[in-house]
Image (spheres, rainbow, N blue to C red):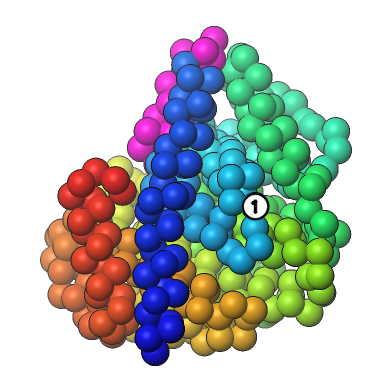
């Protein structure tokens, strides 16, 4: 038990004191690049996506601490890939565009970035704003450069591309006009539900919205001895459980904000607060169980508890009558998560998170 506690403390300390500064440095470089984007709309969305979604890059960069991973290079990849994701989300959500063809073309960047070599697309082909001065192409290239160094890339290739395509599909459908998005999304996810009988369609969609499975598979592929069995274990542990927990927590804290803005929110589809609580508990329980099946289980269980601590430390988790559910979730997770939660609250108070 002492050994586990020391490992968790070491991981948390390195995450904050080594990873956070690296993420900050990477984002500052991207801000300088975004500030040179010629088109005012694209420039504004690029800058907003970095400044308002920094914690996405911070959280995802925990996978730079996976044993054997080249830390700096992995942070660079994660920040580059997550910035593509956040930037495209803004282009679909905040620019007044609702064009399915444009959204799908933009999100080809998510799969191109995971393919070594010179495969590119004209990402802005159907989008009304086009001149980003090479910003998106630069991010895609930075990801490609790292992917091309992975000794076990062939083993994870189809798995990361599958997850990237699911992510892209979700982003396309969720940003369509409110009167059609639910129907289109239901038509999409029903093709997969037979393979995931323990979850419903909206939970599947939530899991598709996480990049954590991609980051973990990439981290695993830095090991030249990675085998197909371990890669499958990672895939099935992260999708749908750990990925689903990640995004359900994200939607949980944004529930009221999304309602005001008319944005789609998967947590809103639960019939009651009690059902929401029970499903979050189930995703947490299954995530921890899946973590035990993987190489370095303590790393993965720390990530799972860290997700609970980070999201539930957001002030929004205590607003609009959700404080009781949040407290019950923390009680369910136990003392270690509560300790991490207190630490995350301190990070937020000191503006480091």
Q: Residue at x 67, y 71 (%)?
A: 235
Q: Residue furthest top?
A: 38
Q: Residue at x 30, y 54 (%)?
A: 254
Horizontally, residue 41 falls left or right of residue 311, namely right
Instruction: From the top left corner, tell me how far across and down residue 153 is, in percent.
Output: 81, 57
In the rendered image of this protein, does residue 208 appear above or below residue 46? below
Image quarter of residue 274: bottom left
In the rendered image of this protein, does residue 330 appear above or below residue 307? below
Could you tell me which quadrant the N terminus lies in? bottom left
Q: Residues within 10 Å of mark 1 (few under 14, many from 20)?
A: few
Q: Residue furthest bottom?
A: 1
* Of the pair 182 and 89, the residue shown nearer to us: 89
Horizontally, residue 285 falls left or right of residue 77, namely left
* Of the pair 325 and 56, the residue shown nearer to us: 56
In the rendered image of this protein, does residue 65 appear above or below residue 350? below
Horizontally, residue 185 falls left or right of residue 107, namely left
In magenta stretch: residue 42: yes
Q: Dot 1: what SS?
A: loop
Q: Is residue 209 visible?
A: no
Image quarter of residue 12: bottom left
Q: Which residues are magenta?
A: 36-53
Instruction: From the top left corner, tell me how far across and down residue 258 is, in percent.
Output: 31, 50
Q: Residue at x 49, y 58 (%)?
A: 62
- Check disc 1 and report the residue beneath it: 70
């Amino acid at each position: 038990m002492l050994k586990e506690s020391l490992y968790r403390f070491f991981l948390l300390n390195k995450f904050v004191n080594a990873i956070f500064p690296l993420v900050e440095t990477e984002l500052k470089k991207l801000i300088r690049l975004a500030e040179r984007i010629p088109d005012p709309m694209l420039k504004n969305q690029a800058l907003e996506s970095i400044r308002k979604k920094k914690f996405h890059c911070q959280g995802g960069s925990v996978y730079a601490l996976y044993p054997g991973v080249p830390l700096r290079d992995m942070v660079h990849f994660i920040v580059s890939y997550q910035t593509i994701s956040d930037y495209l989300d803004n282009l679909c959500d905040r620019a007044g565009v609702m064009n399915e063809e444009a959204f799908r073309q933009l999100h080809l960047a998510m799969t191109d970035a995971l393919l070594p070599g010179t495969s590119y697309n004209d990402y802005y082909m159907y989008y009304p704003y086009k001149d980003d001065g090479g910003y998106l192409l630069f991010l895609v290239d930075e990801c490609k450069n790292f992917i091309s160094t992975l000794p076990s890339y062939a083993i994870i290739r189809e798995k990361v591309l599958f997850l990237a395509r699911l992510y892209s599909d979700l982003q396309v459908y969720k940003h369509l006009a409110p009167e059609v998005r639910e129907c289109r999304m239901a038509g999409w996810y029903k093709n997969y539900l037979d393979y995931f009988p323990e979850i419903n369609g909206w939970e599947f969609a939530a899991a598709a919205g996480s990049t954590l499975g991609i980051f973990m598979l990439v981290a695993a592929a830095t090991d030249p001895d990675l085998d197909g069995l371990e890669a499958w274990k990672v895939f099935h542990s992260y999708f749908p459980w750990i990925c689903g927990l990640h995004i359900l927590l994200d939607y949980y804290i944004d529930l009221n904000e999304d309602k005001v803005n008319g944005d789609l929110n998967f947590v809103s589809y639960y019939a009651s607060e009690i059902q929401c609580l029970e499903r979050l508990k189930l995703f947490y329980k299954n995530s921890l169980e899946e973590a035990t099946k993987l190489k370095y289980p303590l790393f993965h269980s720390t990530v799972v508890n860290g997700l609970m601590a980070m999201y539930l430390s957001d002030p929004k988790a205590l607003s609009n009558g959700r404080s009781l559910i949040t407290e019950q979730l923390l009680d369910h997770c136990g003392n270690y998560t509560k300790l991490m939660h207190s630490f995350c609250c301190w990070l937020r108070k000191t503006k480091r998170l």
